[in-house]
């Protein structure tokens, strides 16, 4: 008959005579579960979360510091590059100025030497031009005298030959120099 009673009562959870024992065991089970969770598991989870949170904050701070350091390094690098460019420009400018100055000095020296050479050449030309008619006259007189002596067979007065050559040379010089 006992088997029949269990079957006729339906589900024991819904039977009011078992409610007190069910509430008792429910309180004990959830009480133990609460104590285990609140005293053992949740503090470990909280500590782990706090550790993770502090680790994340430290990592963020370290990343921020490294970002700031990298920005400073980039600024320093850009300053170094800019100063190097400026130094290179200054060196190039100084070298260019020095080369131009050296070229100017050498050009002046060369111009002075050329002027001296031109002056010497002009003096030589003037001297030659001044002395040339005398030499030409002398050669013309001698040659004419020799030719006339050969042609005529007698000596001709050199003063008359000299006067004729001088007269001809003066006419030619006047034509040549445009006087």
Image: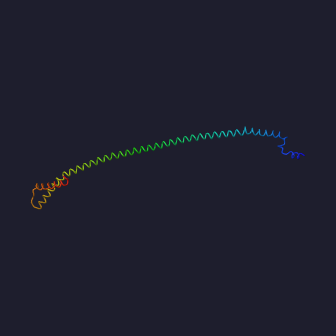
Outermost residue, right side: 1
Q: Quadrant of residue 87?
A: top left
Left or right relative to 85: residue 26: right
Q: Is residue 142 above or below residue 111?
A: below
x and y, in percent, of residue 15 in the image: 84, 42
x and y, in percent, of residue 149 in the image: 11, 60
Q: Nearer the viewer, residue 36 or 30?
A: 30
Q: Nearer the viewer, residue 158 or 85?
A: 85
Colour mapping: rainbow
Left or right relative to 113: residue 9: right
Q: Is residue 58 above or below residue 117?
A: above
Marks counted in the figure total 0
Left or right relative to 45: residue 128: left
Left or right relative to 174: residue 95: right
x and y, in percent, of residue 167 in the image: 14, 54
Q: Quadrant of residue 173?
A: bottom left
Q: Nearer the viewer, residue 90 or 27?
A: 27
Q: Is residue 141 above or below residue 70?
A: below
x and y, in percent, of residue 97 in the image: 38, 44
């Amino acid at each position: 008959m006992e088997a029949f009673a269990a079957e006729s009562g339906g589900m024991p959870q819904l039977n009011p005579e078992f409610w007190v024992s069910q509430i008792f065991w429910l309180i004990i089970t959830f009480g133990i579960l609460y104590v285990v969770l609140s005293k053992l598991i949740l503090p470990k989870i909280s500590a782990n979360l706090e550790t993770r949170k502090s680790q994340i904050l430290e990592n963020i701070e370290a990343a921020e510091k490294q970002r700031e350091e990298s920005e400073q390094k980039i600024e320093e690098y850009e300053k170094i590059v800019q100063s190097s460019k400026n130094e290179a420009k200054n060196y190039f400018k100084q070298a260019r100025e020095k080369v131009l100055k050296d070229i100017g000095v050498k050009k002046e020296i060369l111009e002075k030497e050329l002027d001296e050479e031109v002056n010497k050449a002009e003096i030589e030309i003037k001297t030659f031009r001044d002395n040339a008619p005398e030499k030409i006259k002398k050669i013309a007189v001698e040659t004419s005298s020799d030719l006339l002596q050969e042609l005529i067979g007698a000596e001709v007065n050199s003063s008359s030959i000299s006067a004729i050559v001088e007269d001809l040379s003066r006419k030619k010089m006047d034509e040549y120099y445009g006087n």
